[in-house]
Image (cartoon, helix red, strand yellow):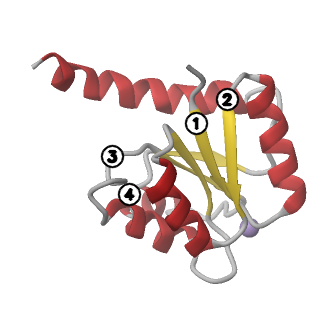
C-alpha cells in the first residue's frame, strides 16, 4: 500500500515540486495550503508522514506542529519541517515544537526523498520494538 503524505505548504511552486518528487517516488500525496486546513486534514487522513512548511500565513509551522502533537489521533505521526529559515536554533525550535526532522529549502530534488525517508526510517526503528511487545 502506498504511504500517504500530507504536505502543508503555502507556496505553489514548492508544493508543485514536492508533490512531483513524492509522486515520482510512489507516495500518495495530499496537500493543504492553509495551517488550520492542514491540521484538520491530518486528523481526518491520519497520514504516514507530514511535511510541514514553517513560514505559513495564519499560524506558523511551530504552532501547527504543536496542534498536531496535542491531539490523540495525530500525536505520533512523524512531522518533518521544510523550511527556508537558516537561523541558528531553528532546528531546535522545530524539534521542540514536535517535529521529527528538518529539511532546508531550497529543496534539492536529488536528495529530498532520501533525506525525508531517513527521518521516517528512524521513526519506524524507534517504534518497531513497541509493536513487538
Ligand atoms: Mn511558506
Residue 122: % across, % down: 40, 27
N-terminal of the pair, mark 2 or mark 4, is 2
Residue 47: % across, % down: 50, 43
Residue 33 in the image: above or below residue 76: below
Instruction: Give the side of residue 96 with respect to residue 46, left or right.
Output: left
Residue annotated with mark 1: 4
Residue 72: % across, % down: 26, 57
Q: In the displayed image of the protein, which residue is found farthest to the top?
A: 132
Q: How far apart are labels 2 and 4 at the CA level?
A: 23 Å
Residue annotated with mark 3: 76
Q: In the displayed image of the protein, which residue is found farthest to the right?
A: 13
Q: How far apart are labels 1 and 2 at the CA level?
A: 6 Å
Q: In the displayed image of the protein, which residue is found farthest to the front?
A: 44
Q: Residue at x 33, y 21 (%)?
A: 125
Q: Residue at x 16, y 16 (%)?
A: 132
Give the class, few, some or many, for how many residues have Cα within 10 Å of label 1's Cα (few <14, many ≥20). Answer: some
- Which circle, 2 or 4, is nearer the viewer? 2
- Which circle, 4 or 1, is nearer the viewer? 1
Residues marked 3 and 4 touching at CB (< 8 Å):
no
N-terminal of the pair, mark 1 or mark 3, is 1
Helix, strand or loop status at disc 3: loop
Q: Which mark is residue 98?
A: 4
Residue annotated with mark 2: 27
N-terminal of the pair, mark 4 or mark 1, is 1
N-terminal of the pair, mark 1 or mark 2, is 1
Give the class, few, some or many, for how many residues have Cα within 10 Å of label 2's Cα (few <14, many ≥20). Answer: some
Residues marked 4 and 1 touching at CB (< 8 Å):
no
Residues marked 1 and 2 touching at CB (< 8 Å):
yes
- Taking depth in this image into account, of 86 and 18 the one nearest to the observer is 18
Helix, strand or loop status at disc 4: loop
N-terminal of the pair, mark 2 or mark 3, is 2
Amino acid at each position: 500500500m502506498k504511504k500517504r503524505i500530507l504536505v502543508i505548504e503555502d507556496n505553489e511552486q514548492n508544493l508543485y515540486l514536492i508533490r512531483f518528487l513524492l509522486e515520482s517516488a510512489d507516495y500518495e500525496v495530499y496537500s493543504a495550503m492553509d495551517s488550520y486546513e492542514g491540521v484538520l486534514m491530518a486528523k481526518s487522513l491520519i497520514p504516514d508522514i507530514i511535511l510541514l512548511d514553517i513560514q505559513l500565513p495564519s499560524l506558523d509551522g511551530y504552532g501547527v506542529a504543536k496542534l498536531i502533537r496535542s491531539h490523540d489521533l495525530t500525536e505520533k505521526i512523524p512531522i518533518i519541517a521544510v523550511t527556508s529559515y537558516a537561523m541558528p536554533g531553528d532546528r531546535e525550535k522545530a524539534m521542540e515544537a514536535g517535529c521529527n526532522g528538518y529539511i532546508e529549502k531550497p529543496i534539492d530534488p536529488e536528495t529530498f526523498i532520501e533525506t525525508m525517508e531517513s527521518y521516517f526510517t528512524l521513526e519506524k526503528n524507534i517504534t518497531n520494538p513497541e509493536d513487538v511487545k
